[in-house]
Image: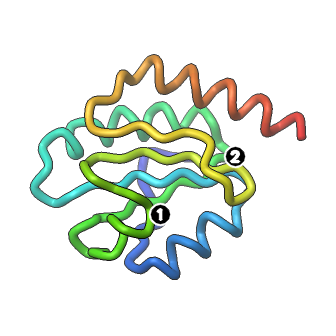
């Protein structure tokens, strides 16, 4: 995967479809005026580039107001990794990139074994 995000999702239906139709799905949820969100995104893209089978999508919570209730989002950014439609990892607000990468690596390896 290159460093651009091809998928930006704009509705709960699109989010659910994306999560449920990829073996490994990753959501990066941000808000427009969130400086942490925009500073962290390039670092997360770089990490995700190391795991090419993970499909990544971006969700701007400002464009999908129902996401807060649907996914229990109370801050931004929120990073959620799904395996076969089930949430297996969630990080929020202040993310330690190296720790996040190690968690993703373990999940990726286990998911590839199944």
Viewer-nearest residue: 63 or 65: 65
Q: Nearer the viewer, residue 75 or 62?
A: 75
Is 94 on the left-hand or right-hand side of 54? left
| Residue 105 coordinates in the image, percent (x, y) | 64, 26
The residue sitting at 25% across, 49% down in the picture is 75
x and y, in percent, of residue 10 in the image: 38, 77
Residue matched to label 1: 6
- Residue 33 shown left or right of residue 14 in the figure: left
Residue 42, placed above or below residue 8: above
Image height check: is 36 above or below 74? above
Q: Where, by quadrant of the figure, is residue 84 drawn?
A: bottom right
Q: Position of residue 89 (x, y in %)?
A: 55, 39
For label 2, the SS is loop
Q: Is residue 17 left or right of residue 12?
A: right
Local crowd size for mark 2, using a 10 Å CA cut-off: few (<14), some (14–19), many (≥20): some
Looking at the rendered structure, the secondary structure element under dot 1 is loop
The residue sitting at the right extreme is 114
Which label sits on residue 53?
A: 2
Q: Position of residue 7 (x, y in %)?
A: 47, 66
Q: Residue at x 61, y 64 (%)?
A: 19
Badge 1: residue crowd in 10 Å (few <14, some 14–19, many ≥20): few
């Amino acid at each position: 995967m290159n460093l651009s995000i091809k998928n930006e999702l704009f509705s709960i239906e699109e989010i659910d479809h994306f999560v449920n139709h990829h073996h490994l799905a990753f959501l990066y949820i941000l808000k427009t005026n969130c400086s942490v969100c925009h500073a962290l995104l390039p670092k997360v893209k770089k990490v995700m580039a190391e795991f090419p089978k993970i499909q990544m999508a971006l969700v701007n919570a400002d464009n999908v107001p129902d996401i807060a209730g649907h996914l229990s989002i109370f801050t931004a950014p929120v990073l959620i990794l799904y395996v076969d439609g089930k949430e297996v990892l969630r990080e929020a607000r202040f993310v330690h990139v190296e720790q996040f990468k190690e968690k993703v690596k373990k999940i990726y390896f286990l998911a590839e074994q199944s």
